[in-house]
Image (cartoon, rainbow, N blue to C red):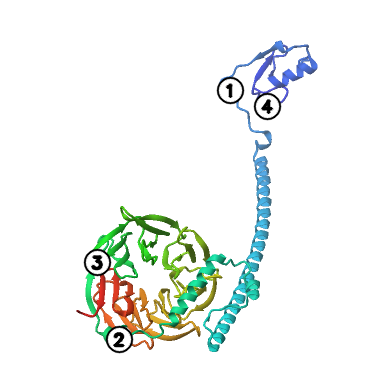
C-alpha cells in the first residue's frame, strides 16, 4: 500500500471515493486545498470525499530510499568516516598546539626557578661571607644580613613582624645577652666532670600514659623542676607533680599521637602547649575546677605538627610542621603573627627551637638540612647541610654560640654560629637512633637520647657517662639547674631521674 502522490507507504492512509486510490492524508489534504480535484482522475472532490483507512499494526515508515541498497549504505558510511577523520585531524592539531604552549610555559617556569635559586644561593653565600668577616672582627651578631636597602631589593615581598613585636624581641635579647655576659664561667655549685661521671638512676616514675598505645613521645619540665609535662602515643597530655608523686592533670582531646609539649614558663598560672600529628596545636589554661582546660585549639598546619618552641620573652611561641611551614604565634590571642614557608624546602620540618636570645630560630628538615632563620625578617641566615638523612633533633647551647644537631646518619654535629662551620662531630654506634638533644644551662655537657642516654663533654666531644636503664627509645631529656641532675622520658612509659646517689 503506497501513496499515489509520494510513492511511499503512508503514515496516515486515506482512500479517495472518487478514484479509489490511497493517499497520505496530509499530502492529499494539501492538494485538495490548492486544486480541489482528485490528483488521479482530476474529478472535483473535497476533504469529505476521503475515508480513513485503519491498519493493524500501524504502518512503519520505511527506510529512506537512499539507504535501501548496499551501495547507498556504503556511501553513507564513507561520508560518516570522512567526517570523523576530519574531526580527529582537527583535534590532533589542537592537541599539538596545546602541548607546545604548555612546554613553552614549563620551560619559562623552570628557567625562572633556576635563576631565583641561583640568586638566593649567591645571596646566602654573601651573607655567610659577611658573617665570617663579622666574626673575625669580633662583632656579636654573626647573622646580620645585608644592608636594609639591599635586602628590600632582593626580598621586597617578604613581610616582617609588627614593630611592637620586634621591639619586645630586641628588649628581651638585650636583657638576656647582658645576663649571659655576667655568667660566663659556671659557679662553684655547678656539677663537675667527676660528679656527672658518677651519676646513676636515683628514682623513676613508671606507668605514665596508657599501656594500650604505650610510650612517652615528648617531655618538658617547668622552671621549678617539680612539674613534668608529657605527651604520649595514647593522644593524651599529662602533668605530673613530683612533690605529690601523682599525675594531677590528664588532658585528652588530640586525635593522634602527641609530638611536642611545652610550658609557657610563667611562675604562676603557667600555660601548657601541646602539638600533635592531628595537625593541631592546643593551648591549655588553668582552671580552678579541673586544674586545666582547653583555651585554644589551633588548626596550625596541613600536615603533622612536629615541634614547638617558646620564645624567651614568654609572650610568643612557634610551631613547625611536616608541611614545610613554621608559624609564629602570640600567646594572648593564639593568632599567627607570621606564617613562613621556605620555597626551596618542600620536604617538611622535623624539629624546631629558638636561639637563647630569641632572634634566631633553628629548624631541621627531612632532606638533611639545618636552617637558621632570622625571626624578625623571616629570612634564612644560614644553612648547614652536611648531614645524611632527616634531622631528628637540634639544641642551642645557653651561650648562644653553638648549635647541636643529630640525624639518621648516627652523627651528632656541633656548629659554631660565629664561624658558620662544623667544629665537632660525634660518631655514634652503627644503627644508633638519636631522638633528642639537651645542653645544660652553662653549655658544658651535651646529653644525647636515643637507644640509651649518653652524656658528652661539649667542648671536645669526649664521652662522660652512659645510662642504659630504659627498655625502649628515649624521647625526652632535661638538665636540672647547674647540671645537678638529668631527667629522661622514654617509650617504656617511664620518666627517670639521674644524679648523685644519696
Residue at mark 4 to residue at mark 2: CA–CA distance: 117 Å
Residue at mark 4 to residue at mark 1: CA–CA distance: 14 Å
79 displayed left or right of 328: right
Residue at mark 1 to residue at mark 2: CA–CA distance: 113 Å
Residue 398 place in picture, x, y as percent:
41, 79
| Quarter of the image that includes the C terminus | bottom left
- Of badges 1 and 2, the one in the foreground is 2
Instruction: For residue 98, say whether it is visible.
Output: yes
Q: Point out which mark residue 243 bears.
A: 3
Q: Which residue is mark 1?
A: 58
Q: How many C-alpha atoms fall within 10 Å of the one at disc 3: few (<14), some, or many (≥20)? A: few
Please state which of residues 56 and 91 is positioned toward the viewer in this rendering.
Answer: 91
30 displayed left or right of 124: right
Local SS, label 1: loop
Residue at mark 1 to residue at mark 3: CA–CA distance: 101 Å
- Of badges 4 and 1, the one in the foreground is 1
Please state which of residues 232 and 132 is positioned toward the viewer in this rendering.
Answer: 132
Residue at x 72% of width, y 25% of height: 6
Q: How many C-alpha atoms fall within 10 Å of the one at disc 1: few (<14), some, or many (≥20)? A: few
Residue at mark 3 to residue at mark 2: CA–CA distance: 27 Å
Q: Are marks 4 and 1 in contact (CB under 8 Å)?
A: no
Residue 128 place in picture, x, y as percent:
55, 82
Task: Say if 382 sits above or below 192 in the image.
Answer: above
Label whose residue precedes the other's in the sequence (4 or 3): 4
Residue at x 28% of width, y 77% of height: 485
Instruction: For residue 370, say whether it is visible.
Output: no
| Quarter of the image that includes the N terminus | top right
Residue 12 place in picture, x, y as percent:
64, 21
Q: Are marks 4 and 2 in contact (CB under 8 Å)?
A: no
Q: Point out which mark residue 8 bears.
A: 4
Q: Which residue is mark 2?
A: 192
Amino acid at each position: 500500500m503506497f501513496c499515489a502522490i509520494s510513492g511511499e507507504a503512508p503514515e496516515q492512509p486515506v482512500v479517495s471515493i472518487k478514484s479509489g486510490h490511497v493517499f497520505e492524508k496530509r499530502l492529499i489534504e494539501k492538494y485538495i486545498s490548492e486544486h480541489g480535484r482528485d490528483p488521479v482522475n482530476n474529478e472535483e472532490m473535497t476533504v469529505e470525499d476521503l475515508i480513513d483507512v485503519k491498519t493493524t499494526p500501524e504502518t512503519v515508515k520505511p527506510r529512506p530510499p537512499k539507504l535501501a541498497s548496499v551501495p547507498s549504505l556504503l556511501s553513507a558510511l564513507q561520508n560518516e568516516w570522512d567526517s570523523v577523520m576530519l574531526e580527529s585531524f582537527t583535534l590532533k592539531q589542537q592537541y599539538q598546539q596545546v602541548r607546545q604552549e604548555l612546554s613553552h610555559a614549563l620551560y619559562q617556569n623552570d628557567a625562572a626557578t633556576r635563576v631565583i635559586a641561583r640568586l638566593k644561593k649567591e645571596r646566602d653565600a654573601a651573607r655567610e661571607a659577611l658573617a665570617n668577616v663579622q666574626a673575625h672582627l669580633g662583632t656579636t651578631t654573626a647573622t646580620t644580613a645585608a644592608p636594609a636597602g639591599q635586602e628590600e631589593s632582593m626580598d621586597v615581598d617578604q613581610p616582617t613582624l609588627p614593630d611592637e613585636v620586634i621591639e619586645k624581641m630586641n628588649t628581651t635579647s638585650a636583657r638576656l645577652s647582658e645576663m649571659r655576659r655576667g655568667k660566663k664561667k659556671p659557679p662553684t655549685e655547678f656539677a663537675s666532670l667527676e660528679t656527672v661521671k658518677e651519676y646513676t638512676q636515683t628514682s623513676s616514675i613508671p606507668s605514665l600514659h596508657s599501656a594500650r598505645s604505650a610510650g612517652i613521645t615528648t617531655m618538658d619540665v617547668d622552671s621549678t623542676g617539680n612539674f613534668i609535662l608529657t605527651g604520649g602515643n595514647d593522644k593524651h597530655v599529662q602533668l605530673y607533680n613530683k612533690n605529690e608523686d601523682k599525675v594531677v592533670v590528664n588532658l585528652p582531646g588530640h586525635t593522634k599521637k602527641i609530638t611536642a609539649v611545652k610550658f609557657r614558663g610563667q611562675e604562676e598560672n603557667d600555660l601548657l602547649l601541646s602539638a600533635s600529628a592531628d595537625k593541631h596545636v592546643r593551648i591549655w589554661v588553668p582552671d580552678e575546677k579541673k586544674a586545666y582546660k582547653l583555651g585554644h585549639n589551633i588548626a596550625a598546619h596541613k600536615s603533622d605538627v612536629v615541634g614547638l618552641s617558646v620564645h624567651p620573652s614568654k609572650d610568643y611561641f612557634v610551631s613547625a610542621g611536616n608541611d614545610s611551614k613554621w608559624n609564629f604565634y602570640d600567646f594572648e590571642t593564639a593568632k599567627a603573627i607570621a606564617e613562613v614557608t621556605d620555597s626551596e624546602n618542600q620536604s617538611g620540618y622535623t624539629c624546631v627551637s629558638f636561639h637563647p636570645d630569641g632572634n634566631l630560630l633553628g629548624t631541621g628538615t627531612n632532606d638533611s638540612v639545618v636552617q637558621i632563620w632570622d625571626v624578625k625578617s623571616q629570612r634564612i641566615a644560614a644553612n648547614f647541610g652536611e648531614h645524611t638523612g632527616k634531622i631528628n633533633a637540634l639544641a642551642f647551647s645557653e651561650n648562644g654560640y653553638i648549635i647541636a644537631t643529630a640525624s639518621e646518619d648516627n652523627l651528632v654535629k656541633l656548629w659554631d654560629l660565629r664561624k658558620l662551620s662544623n667544629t665537632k662531630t660525634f660518631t655514634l654506634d652503627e644503627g644508633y637512633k638519636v631522638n633528642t638533644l639537651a645542653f645544660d644551662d652553662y653549655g658544658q655537657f651535651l646529653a644525647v637520647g636515643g637507644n640509651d642516654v649518653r652524656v658528652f663533654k661539649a667542648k671536645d666531644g669526649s664521652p662522660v657517662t652512659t645510662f642504659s636503664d630504659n627498655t625502649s627509645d628515649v624521647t625526652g631529656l632535661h638538665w636540672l639547674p647547674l647540671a645537678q641532675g638529668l631527667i629522661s622520658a622514654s617509650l617504656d612509659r617511664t620518666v627517670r631521674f639521674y644524679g648523685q646517689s644519696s
